Amino acid sequence: MQTNFSLTQLADPAMAASEKILRTCVHCGFCTATCPTYLLLGDELDSPRGRIYLIKDMLEGGKPAVPEVVKHVDRCLSCLSCMTTCPSGVHYMHLVDHARAHIEETYRRPLSDRLLRSVLAFVLPYPNRFRLALLGAKLGAPFRPLVARLPRVGNRLAAMLDLAPAQLPNRNPTDRPGTFMPETRALEASAALHGEAAPARTGRVALLRGCAQSVLRPDFNEAAIRVLTRHGVEVVQAKGEGCCGALTHHMGKADASHAQAQRTIDAWIAEMDGAGLDAILVTASGCGTTIKDYGFMFREDPAYAEKAKRVSAIAKDVTEYVATIGLMPPIVETDLVVAYHSACSMQHGQGIRTEPKNLLKTAGFTVKDVPEGHICCGSAGTYNILQPEIANRLRDRKVANIERMRPDVIATGNIGCATQIGKGTAIPIVHTVELLDWATGGPKPTALEGLPERTLLAAE
């Protein structure tokens, strides 16, 4: 793609990076075949190629964002399926992130939109605030029909009420800063099976506590801690760590997202420079995609460029890490059929496609791929609140594809997907690591308690 940015414009590192991305695009249109919004709406401007043209015109002309551009950029899920499809290697993620930041700086949204986005940015990254908001949503649920009729924001407020859990999980004792040491007996048993001496420790990792996930599904990280310590890994949840910044980053709120990321980077660097870390693990793939991109996000920051690069270099999804250390033989035999839903941030954002499925198979589960698995479920951070109609259509499409397979359980690696899909089906949905935990000696996932007993415990 030919560009005509001035030298003055290209002196801005963000603009120079976007110009390079724009020049990579060859207009081939392959991206339209896998773009969820183009698939549903059939509008070229709601495809990656169409958005690229709009973004190019906006940035190249040095123009403030206009409603037409905002509408189509806002409709983008950032699912990144286009990046998997693109034969030219267009880094669409960085381009649309820049466009969102430009929109946030130059466009004055309607008051209702500004207020809603400010509330989301104020609440979601902070677990205590989020917990209070969910309690409020529970009280407000009976008034949903009235709320839905409010002008301009009714559909989005109704979507927020719909997504709130009917029952809020209790606070989890593992959701705290601290260190969790390896399980000695589990190490010895595993080593005995292989005729080896039990190691004292096989690694030391930091585990992101997260924000929304720690409130909605604290059992995800609890299961991850059990799996890791059972395999000889020392797990630390760093003091001072907070939200990774992903939620506000994707709303274009660069200052807020960078401040949140800096706090978390500092917490992890302290651990890296102290007792050391072999990896930084994440159980929410949406967060993982952003953390792995810290090196780019802070590339021009003299205080954080090197620190961010160090963090990104050792960031891994929990399944990515467990695959490297090897899963111990399962002690629970099961004939459960698992539909594996690969989150967009997992398969497109991080390029992790086989590790979670292979681990589930090793653990003894029958694993099935979901038809149209490359198409987003509609969660996408805050998208299912800000664009509920499109999100619901994508969820219904995803659920129909899953239910056609008649699985016993759905496994995924992202809290957003678990929440979104879970609202559309009665099939229980769990984190991949919960099944790995169960198979190797942990408790049966709470979400599976309603299933008929179809497991055979190995001899104790």
Image (tube, rainbow, N blue to C red):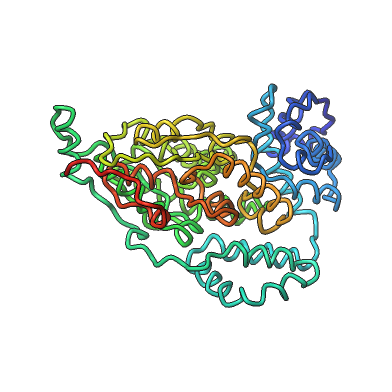
- The total of numbered circles placed on residues is 0
**Vertical order, 408 against 152 (above or below):** above
* Pick the front one: 106 or 456: 456
* Pick the front one: 68 or 169: 169
Q: Position of residue 289 (x, y in %)?
A: 54, 41
Residue at image x 82%, y 50%? 65
User: Which quarter of the rendered picture does the N terminus lie within?
Assistant: top right
Residue at image x 85%, y 38%? 57
* Pick the front one: 119 or 41: 41
User: Which quarter of the rendered picture does the C terminus lie within?
Assistant: top left
Residue at image x 64%, y 51%? 254
Q: Position of residue 253 (x, y in %)?
A: 65, 54
Residue at image x 40%, y 47%? 268
Q: Is residue 260 left or right of residue 99?
A: left
Q: Position of residue 233 (x, y in %)?
A: 27, 41
* Pick the front one: 72 or 387: 387
Q: Is residue 127 left or right of residue 221?
A: right
Q: Position of residue 187 (x, y in %)?
A: 19, 39
